[in-house]
Each structure stands twice: as C-alpha cells, then as structure tokens.
Image (spheres, rainbow, N blue to C red):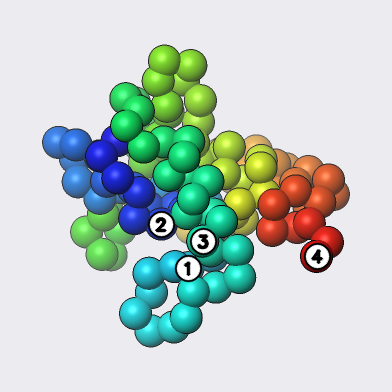
Amino acid sequence: MTRVVDGDTVVVEQVGTVRLIGVDTPETVDPRGPVEYFGREASDFTRQLATGRRVRLEFDQDRIDRYGRTLAYVYLQPEDLLLNAEIIRQGYGFAYIQFPFRMMAQFRALEREAREAGRGLWAVR
C-alpha cells in the first residue's frame, strides 16, 4: 500500500486508487465541505494500520465506482486482516449500505458492536 487518501480510500501500487467496499468514514478531503467529526482520526487509523503493507485485493459485484476508483476488499498481509472490517470494528467508520455487497450483514453487525461498546466515533465525548 503506497498511501492513504482518507479513512476509506487508499492507493495501491500497480492498481491505483482503491475505495474500500462497504465502509464509509467521515470525510477529510471533500472539496465541497469541511473535515467531518472524527475524520482525521479515521484517516490516521487507516494510515497507521495500512501504510507500507502488502495487500491482497478481493472484488465484489462492481469493480469500479462512478469516480473511476477500484472497489475492493483490502486484506493486509501477512495476517490477512480485512481492513474494511477492521475500520468498522474499531469504530472508525460505518457500514456503507447504499449499494449491495456480499459482506453487508457482517459489516452491519460489526458497526452495531462498535456502537454498543462505545468504540471510536461512538465513544461518549
């Protein structure tokens, strides 16, 4: 992984920009608006977890989004940790359910658990 754009978008060498399937994090680089609550923390979490790591990509129904980004599940190597799920599990993002994807039920359950446990953006401040 060469760099993190924001909490749910990364750049992978030889692939380009990759939007993580099924996860949405608060915005940090949207030119139409300000940095959203917990956006910097979400981007930092993804950056610390993924930068410089080898990855394995898996695809779902759609491989490209309307912005030309590759849509993928990103597995961090060597432990094969699913980055998309870990962001939600730790409370740095939401399950993004606007479009169907095969892990939707799992990601919704992870979001529910993070909310109930008060992790990340669900913490009482």
Lower position in the chain sequence, tag 2 or tag 3: 2
Q: Secondary structure at mark 3?
A: helix
Q: Position of residue 29 (x, y in %)?
A: 38, 69
Lower position in the chain sequence, tag 1 or tag 3: 1
Which residue corresponds to mark 4?
125
- Nearest to the observer: residue 110 or residue 40: 40
Under mark 2, the amino acid is Asp
* Rendered-image quadrant of the C terminus: bottom right
Task: Report the side of 68 relative to 20 (left or right).
Answer: left
Lower position in the chain sequence, tag 2 or tag 4: 2
Q: Is the Cβ of the residue at disc 1 closer than 8 Å to that at disc 2?
A: yes
Which residue corresponds to mark 3?
40
Task: Report the side of 123 relative to 9 (left or right).
Answer: right
Dot 2: within a 10 Å radius of its alpha carbon, few (fewer than 14), some, or many (20 or more) residues? many
- Image height check: is 11 above or below 55? below
From mark 1 to mark 2, how far is it between C-alphas? 7 Å
